Amino acid sequence: MNYVLGLKCKECGHRTGVLPVHVCEACFGPYEVEYDYGKMKGKVTRESIARGPRSLWRYKDLLPVDVPRVGFHSGFTPLKRAVRLAAELGCSDLWLKDDSCNYPTYSYKERVVSVAISKAIEFGFDTVGCASTGNLANSTAAHAAQAGIRCFVMIPHDLEQGKVLGSLIFAPTMVRVRGTYDDVNRLCTEIADKYGWAIVNVNLRPYYTEGAKTYGFEIAEQLGWRLPRHTIVPTAGGTILPKVYKAYQELIELGLVENNQPGIHSAQAAGCNPVVTAIHKGVDIIEPQKPNTIAKSIAIGNPADGYYVYQAVKASGGWGESATDPEIVDAIKLLAKTEGIWTEPAGGTTLAATIKLIQQGRIPTNESIVISITGNGLKTQEVVMNELPYPSVIEPKLSEFGKLLEQSRLNERAPVPEAAVV
Amino acid sequence: MSIRVRIPSPLRGYTNGADVVESPGANVGEVLNNLKTQAAGIETRLFKGPNQLNRFVNVYLNDEDIRFLKNLDTPVKDGDEISIVPAIAGG
């Protein structure tokens, strides 16, 4: 936090202090945290970062918090070399940044929540809250429980069971709203206005979004202080993609990595793709949509930072693609079968979009690629329930098993060696 | 005909703190434009040009985003309520 200058409006440049505000009073644009990079040079180095904890707080110098209060085991998730998936897709340098195992609620949201709740406590708030499509509520409720702070989570009424239970278990006050996420979000903005609570993704948004940079910092550090030529990121409200772009640019600015022109691509569900639509049209006006997709976690028809996703994609020379619901499910299964990772629809969307971008030649197969996995499939079981028929039950007899094995040999790609059957 | 317009807190400096203001007009654009008679200067925050809303302002007519209706040309009738909500929120 030593390096924070204050808040600056992304649109008109108007500045204000370190306050729990997100809307510029001059032009209604969004505030963003501003840092003194000059002061960082020589002090924030690869070595200083390597001395940090093996969590997202490793990058504390580039985050707007004085005293971390939660998230001590969050972040620093695996960057996995995807060898078998690469073979399927014909790629040579393919990686998965895997937040599906993030602590303690298995999604990338731990990053933004850890920063927001720490900041809320610094500001003296006694209640935190959020509007969520599921993962954010889970993470906010869990971290609020760890910090011992009161918590409200607001969700659309029809979320997956895993996402609903995944918040309820931490005993927040949950509000289920009849409507879409966009309805919930709007209500939450009005609540933040009226009750003076720290709504992590509303009035604490400038601090909240900074946490997402750690996803990008870790990619760079784990790749050996190298930026991938292509990073594909799912777009919901538009938080992660612009901050991955900012993270890469900050590392370049500080001289920690070489500028190899890293491209950033947006992935959305075909049933809710306002940003990819704008990218394809080449116009920076994001037209809102009514979402219609199984990818509920990214079903945001009116993305708050959609415009900034567009800008980051354009500035980085990236592109965007959409995935249909069947393509999303197929991608979830492909990832699980080749890499042993079970992701939720947002991750399936990102892999499916990556496949299209490779097929289109927008991502050359011989360049370094990082696919963003942002959440865990255990929380969205409904999506694959009909895709994974249970095998039939056998009696506990060796002969029954033998029959089963014989049948499965006929179904398998590779035959089971004789020696395995005794 | 006067329509109720709900004003978010970043704009209440223009309305002397009022969170609801009644304003006349036959469509959403007129109602918003006419706010300036009671809240001088508010139009500079709402509009970036004639008939063009500031990108960061979302306007709802009876809880429906006007971009799904007829934008500023959406007609209004007695009993309707317009809400102005800053767009920068949500994750």
Image (spheres, coloured by chain):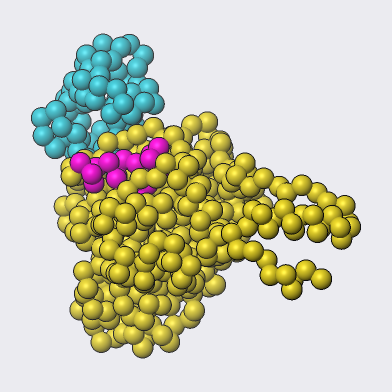
Residues A291 and A349: in front is: A349
Q: Inspect this view and state whether residue A207 appears.
A: no
Q: Which chain is the one coloured yellow?
A: A
Return the x and y of residue A264 as percentages of the image width and height: 28, 60
| Residue ranking furthest to the front | A418
Closer to the camera, A5 or A311? A311
**Residue at the (25%, 21%) spot, across then down:** B70
Q: Does the magenta portion include A276?
A: yes
Residue at image coords 40%, 61%? A89
Q: Quarter of the image holding residue B41? A: top left
Q: Position of residue B88 (x, y in %)?
A: 32, 46
In the rendered image of the structure, the colour used to display chain B is cyan
Q: Quadrant of residue A96?
A: bottom left
Q: Left or right: A410 with respect to A285?
A: right
Give the residues drawn in magenta, as a range: A266-281
B68 relative to A80, above or below: above
Q: Residue at x 31, y 85 (%)?
A: A45
Location of the C terminus of chain A (image quadrant): bottom right
Q: Nearer the viewer, residue A387 or A277?
A: A387
Can see residue A160? yes
Q: Is residue A281 above or below residue A256?
A: above
